[in-house]
Amino acid sequence: MAKNKISFKLKNKLSELDTLCQKLEGFGESIGLSPKFVFETNLALDELFTNIISYGYSDKKVHHISVTISLQDSQLLFSIEDDGMPFNPTEVDEPDLGCTIEECKIGGLGIHLAKNLMDEVCYQRCKDKNILTLRKHIQDPRPAKKRMKG
């Protein structure tokens, strides 16, 4: 019988992206998720994790980022908790997707991608920690309305 929840900690290093991917793929396989579903969720988590590492810390110290992935009913829930600088990705403006490559501003596309791959993205700051909660429905093939909560 598959476990319905895994929790693990990653260091604030880009090399940990491989571990994140392996954990998600292993969990997805154990509960029977499609490769497409795992790919999409991995892409979203990769973007958010990279953002935390790249912009969340002003020092060179090792920090730990806690990740929990759980299956509840017909949805996957993700919790990412870090002690980096306060940052609410749900408040980031949508990028201008109509601009040319030369006109586009750098940044924001990864967050936009993650928001659009997930059904719900919620943020809260609690006890000096950023807590990002993501939700993605597994069985509903219809495009979900994107919901944000700050």
Image (spheres, rainbow, N blue to C red):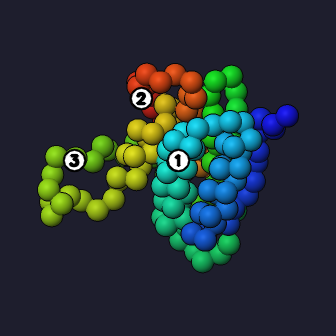
Q: Which amino acid is tagged 3?
A: Asp
Label 3 sits on residue = 96
What residue is shown at x 60% (from left), y 77% (from top)?
60
Taking the image as drawn, is residue 102 in sight?
A: yes
Quadrant, the N terminus: top right
Q: Secondary structure at mark 1?
A: helix
- Judging depth in this view, the residue of 33 and 62 nearest the camera is 33
In the image, which is nearer the foreground, mark 2 or mark 1?
Answer: 1
Residue 146, numbered label? 2
Asked if residue 141 lies left or right of residue 21, the reply is left
Q: Secondary structure at mark 2?
A: loop
Determine the image quadrant of residue 144: top left
The residue sitting at the bottom extreme is: 60
The residue sitting at the right extreme is: 1
Q: Is residue 34 above or below residue 75?
A: below
Q: Secondary structure at mark 3?
A: loop
The residues tagged by marks 3 and 1 sit, at their Cα atoms, a distance apart of 25 Å
Position in image of residue 11 (x %, y %): 68, 66
Kindly indicate whether the residue at mark 1 contacts the one at mark 3 (C-beta within 8 angstroms).
no
Determine the image quadrant of residue 84: bottom right
Asked if residue 6 lies left or right of residue 79, the reply is right
Label 1 sits on residue = 39
Disc 2 crowd rating (10 Å Cα; few below 14, some 14-19, many 20+) is few
